[in-house]
Image (cartoon, rainbow, N blue to C red):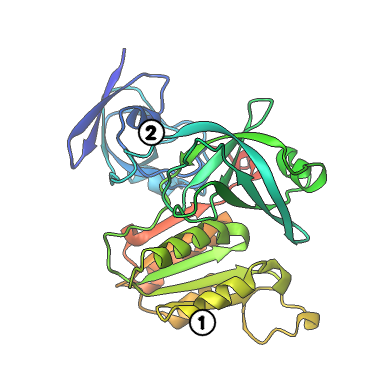
Amino acid sequence: MNHKITILPSMKQVDCEPSETLLNAALHANLILPYGCKDGACGSCKADLVSGLVDYGTYQSRALSEEERVRGKVLTCCARPLSDVQLKVRELSGLGDIPVKKMPCRVQHIDRKADDVIVLTLQLPANEVLQFLAGQYIEFILRDGSRRSYSLANPPSHQGSIELHLRHMPGGLFTDHVFGTMKEREILRFEGPLGTFFLREESTKPVILLASGTGFAPIKSIVEQAFFKNLDRRFVLYWGARTKPDLYMLELAEQWARDHGNFTFVPVLSEPTTACNWSGRTGFVHHAAMQDLPDMSAYQVYACGAPVVVDSAQRDFVQQCGLPEDEFYADAFTSLADMDSSPK
């Protein structure tokens, strides 16, 4: 027997099968709720369970703490209804008209930017257009049916090909292939666009962009689309990495800062070497943002990268800098190792 899911405060209702997650039921009804990994690892889909019973499913403790669960929080990507349910969650507009497609693509360029980072350019079929919002991601569909997610690094204004930034995960089925045996003109298959990490253009608030490692990819898409649309909001990008070579597009970000008066770039290294002769900021990347902007009450934050960086930034920005909780938008890059560890 299907259960009724009521979304507050809009009072919109969707039917949900007992075996279906709350998120999938909403998406199938063309009702867009926040989500990221869809695997219970990032916490982007967190909502308030106002009434009803659910099977919470399997998820990572960092995505939903026991204290949050006691307070009535639930991950819609994992939870399945055991009764009719009322959820309080922010609905999103602007995504319902963007079709999610499955399509082939051809490897056009394989550009190694660092020892463990490749920028992959993929050519789309001549008769296909991939409509998306800057910050969204695609999922490669591998031959065994498994999937790998990567953020789009090019802006939506750039059509015909797509750009992805891949970090090598030793032992990873897909990245071992990319860094070892992949050749240009190889055919891949993907589904997208997916995710709800994108710039909220209806706001006029200044923006803090926070990236770690290849979390720079969706940030690049957002920044280049903002430049394309001549948005006059203030943007400040904090990009954190271990060593200078890990800032694999340093010159591009520096050029943005020279060309655009409303854009500031702050690179931060956590483990600078003497060989790189680094005179810039050091330490945790989100600490640099807190030092420069101790009052974030009037800001929006878009954070992307390693889960530990995203989680730390969200906690400290809200608790110590006064950032409104609902103005922190994130895309935590979760690997299979992340999703296999500490399940609830």
Q: Residue at x 50, y 49 (%)?
A: 159
The amino acid pointed to by label 1 is: Arg
Q: Residue furthest front?
A: 126
Say the numbered circle drawn on residue 258. Answer: 1
Image quadrant of residue 157? bottom left
Image quadrant of residue 309? bottom right
Residue 155 in the image: state x and y as whole percent. 48, 56
Relative height, residue 156 to residue 258 (above, below): above
Residue position for label 2: 23
Observer-nearest of 252 and 63: 252
Image quadrant of residue 172? top right
Label 1 residue SS: helix
Q: Residue furthest top?
A: 1
Relative height, residue 315 to residue 274 (above, below): above
Q: Residue at x 44, y 44 (%)?
A: 195
Q: Crowdedness of circle 2 by 10 Å Cα count: few (<14), some, many (20+)?
A: many
Label 2 residue SS: helix
Query: Is residue 284 at all visible to an observer of this figure?
Result: no
Badge nearest the viewer, 2 or 1: 1
Q: Marks 2/1: CA distance?
A: 42 Å
